[in-house]
Image (cartoon, helix red, strand yellow):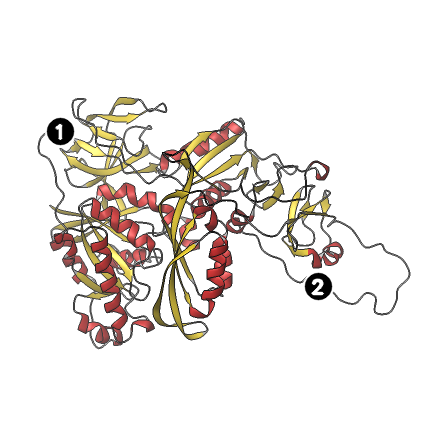
Amino acid sequence: MNLRNVCIIAHVDHGKTTLVDHLLRQSGTFSEREQVAERVMDSMDLERERGITIQAKNCSIRSGDTKINIVDTPGHSDFGGEVERILGMVDGAVLLVDAAEGPLPQTRFVLQKSLAKGHRVILCINKVDRPECVGGERIKEVVNHAFDLFIDLGANELQADFPIVYACARQGWCTTNFDDIPDLISGAKKSSLQPLIDLITTVIPEPEVRDEGGLQMMVSNLGWSDFVGRLAIGKITSGQISTNQKITRKGINSSGQPINEPFSVVKLFSYRGLQQVETNQIQAGDIGVIAGSDLFDIGDTLVSQDSVPALPRIEVEKPTLAMIFSVNTSPFSGRDGEAVQSRKLRERLLVEARMNVAIRFLETEVPDQFRILGRGELQFAIMIEQMRREGMEFMVGRPLVITSTNEAGLKTEPLERATLDLPEAYSGDVTRMFQERKGILVSYETSGTHTGPSGTQNRVRLEFDIPTRGLLGMRTKYMTATRGEGLFSSRLIGYADWKGEMLHRSNGALISDREGLSTEYALLNLDDRGVMFVRPGAHLYEGMVIGENNRENDLNINACREKKLTNVRAAGSDHYESLKGIREMTLERCIEWIDDDEWIEVTPKNIRLRKKVLASNQRSIVRRTDS
């Protein structure tokens, strides 16, 4: 059987999962009467709710006598670790680029990793039916930008001679002929995704396998079965594997020491469409799923005998942010969910670190607090939301950048290249915002005329070099400043000298000074003090943050005060009043908003903000800059 192993890589929301959907449908994976949901590869609830891919997933399609294993990868930079660990499992890539937006930071990141692996890449210009692409000039510009990106990233002569396919993944068609695009959009011509499948079978090489040395397989992903337990997923680089075969897992223990664990293969699975189908044997070059050990870890090598060497472990980019996870110590602990002890919280975080190579777990000096290292705010938010949905209660602190020291002994911090695509009318305000956060404008260029919610407008693309500290909490402010019409993405470019002090947020907090129920009467009287986070009837406790102050200092307030009832009424004194507005604080907003002296209390039913020191007479209301 002929084999091809390929991954779909792109920036977030450029259409990877939609493309895989139609590849599965057109290859006959589903029967004609089978009801299939949209974005069928997004199997997690959070993926469907947010419309993004979070975890890399495998599937396969058939084209004649060729089996094509496809890996759908996340497009958000925070989940770059998912992309890095599966690139060794494939032999080529389909790079999706939005026909209007062009190459963006995650496009550059994943393409660089793929080219470094020596992969052949097929360029797929998706969403060619967008209004901005009428006439084809923008499509040609995007192709030129993509070619420049290949050259800039050091593509060799063979890689730079990449084939191009123009697609509308939403409608399930593509073409290699640029002149056919208008007729395909209008419906005068019909097509499918077969041209892309043909390119995969002809351009992407067959897997390289070694005939000598016995079985060798890298564990690139993990799974779980209720019947056989932990599953190891990866590509077999040499030899073959059979059911009941005695093999060895070469890994490392918690101390980093190499270990050899012999075990028997209980079950073997290969991919057929979306399903894992049980089989008795898997040949070299194919992607398989193995059961037999509960100690599988990403980066392990499975070998047929101890003399076969282990493959180099998967290396990913270093984490840039750290967040403290703590046992819930608030007065309302245990009301909404399971108030977990430090042992159970530690075990859950260790499981997350084992399943995700981009996450690292560290102990702290405080026995009930643990330090988790990761890539970005969204990655932490997804992890916290998953734990919350499991019924756990805990607290998390503000994300902090991971600093280092250079050869001269000076403090350095991670530096990111932020790419902003926005209407030209908002560029002045956005530039000021980023410069206040120590950002340096390195590029300003027009990106054509786009049609948006507010009509046709000129758009510009700005690039800033900005410390990771400066990006914390910036996404919401940026979307507000651009009226929701801006695109925001960033990538790590290295480390730079410490940029000095930086105020995380300019406003202080409104803090409840007692326990009780919030009343509408009290909130109305406090409305001019700032923006409230809680509604009337909310349960409060002393030290709980219930709003944002208009001024820079914190303010302790009584939001539980009730109106004194008397028999005296004056005409017009009880006129109708309403609150100016409540800011709904989602988990992501809380992560962006909190400061160093605050916790986010996470429960299955509620997300609350609180001060680390609850008693009002034991903490200062004066806020200080980030040191």
Question: Which-is-in-front pick, marks 2 and 1?
Answer: 2
Is residue 214 something one can see in this rendering?
Answer: yes
Q: Which residue is at a point 64% across and 51% down the rendered structure image?
A: 552
User: Height in image: 159 above or below 571?
Assistant: above
Q: CA distance from mark 2 to mark 1?
A: 75 Å
User: Height in image: 114 above or below 370?
Assistant: below
* 135 vs 571, nearest the viewer: 135
Image coords of residue 360 (percent x, y)? 40, 34
The numbered mark at residue 578 is: 2
Horizontal relation, residue 417 to residue 110: left or right = right
Q: Amino acid at mark 2?
A: Ser
Few, some or many residues within 10 Å of mark 1 (<14, 14–19, 20+)? some
* 71 vs 105, nearest the viewer: 105
Image coords of residue 80 (percent x, y)? 34, 46
Q: Which residue is at the far front?
A: 408
Q: Secondary structure at mark 2?
A: loop
User: Height in image: 146 above or below 227?
Assistant: below
Label 1, on which residue?
214
Horizontal relation, residue 101 to residue 148: left or right = right
The numbered mark at residue 554 is: none
Image coords of residue 615 (percent x, y)? 70, 37
Q: Amino acid at mark 1?
A: Gly
User: Height in image: 385 above or below 342?
Assistant: below
Few, some or many residues within 10 Å of mark 2 (<14, 14–19, 20+)? few
Is residue 31 something one can see in this rendering?
Answer: no
Q: Which residue is at the far left?
A: 211
Q: Which residue is at the far right?
A: 568
Q: Quadrant of the N terminus?
A: top left
